[in-house]
Amino acid sequence: MNAQTLAQARKGYAQHARTTQTPRATEYELIARVTHRIKASAEAGPRAYPKLVRALSDNHRLWTALAVDVADKDNGLPQDLRAQIFYLAEFVQQHTAKVLNRKARIAPLLEINAAILRGLSGRRPKS
């Protein structure tokens, strides 16, 4: 198998793998990506501020979508979990505004996303 054939095979497999991904895995991937972008932008310093703003905006949109999803009466999650996710979405919206106004730190947003990632992966928090 030559390099071109191998690359085509990988590309085809990757596309197929993405289409068979579960909704939970898709949520995990999206949250992980935006969390990584927020953290990397914040660590890069003031010159990366435009990237940080874009990452925070994407996180804001992600949490808005989660809030809309859990507000749907046909959502299959337990009511108390839906309420908790909705509350977190509201907090993320408010805290993001504070971060963008340089009145709050990014850490709580990263901690919330990390907690959601642990929940989606089934891992327990470290004691």
Image (cartoon, grey):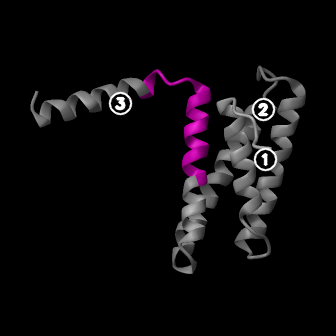
> Which residues make up the magenta segment?
18-35
Q: Residue at x 76, y 40 (%)?
A: 125
For the residue marked with disc 1, what is the amino acid? Ala
- Would you say 88 lies left or right of 53 here? right
Whether residue 19 appears in magenta in the rendering, the answer is yes
Residue 3 vertical position relative to residue 109 in the rendered view, above or below: above
Q: Mark 3 sits on what residue? A: 14
Which mark sits nearer the N-terminus, 2 or 1? Answer: 2
For the residue marked with disc 2, what is the amino acid? Val
Instruction: Tell me whether the residue at label 2 lies in contact with that at label 1, contact meaning CB atoms closer than 8 angstroms.
Output: yes
Marking on residue 67: none
Badge 3: few (under 14), some or many (20 or more) residues near its Cα, within 10 Å? Answer: few
Q: Mark 1 sits on what residue? A: 89
Q: In which quadrant of the rendered image does the C terminus lie?
A: top right
Percent from the top left, x then y, of residue 14? Answer: 35, 30
- Residue 22: image quadrant is top right
Badge 1: few (under 14), some or many (20 or more) residues near its Cα, within 10 Å? Answer: many
Q: Mark 2 sits on what residue? A: 70
- Would you say 6 lies left or right of 110 here? left
Percent from the top left, x then y, of residue 94? Answer: 81, 60
CA gap between label 2 and label 1 equals: 10 Å
Camera-nearest residue between 60 and 12: 12
CA gap between label 2 and label 3 equals: 30 Å
Percent from the top left, x then y, of residue 116? Answer: 72, 40
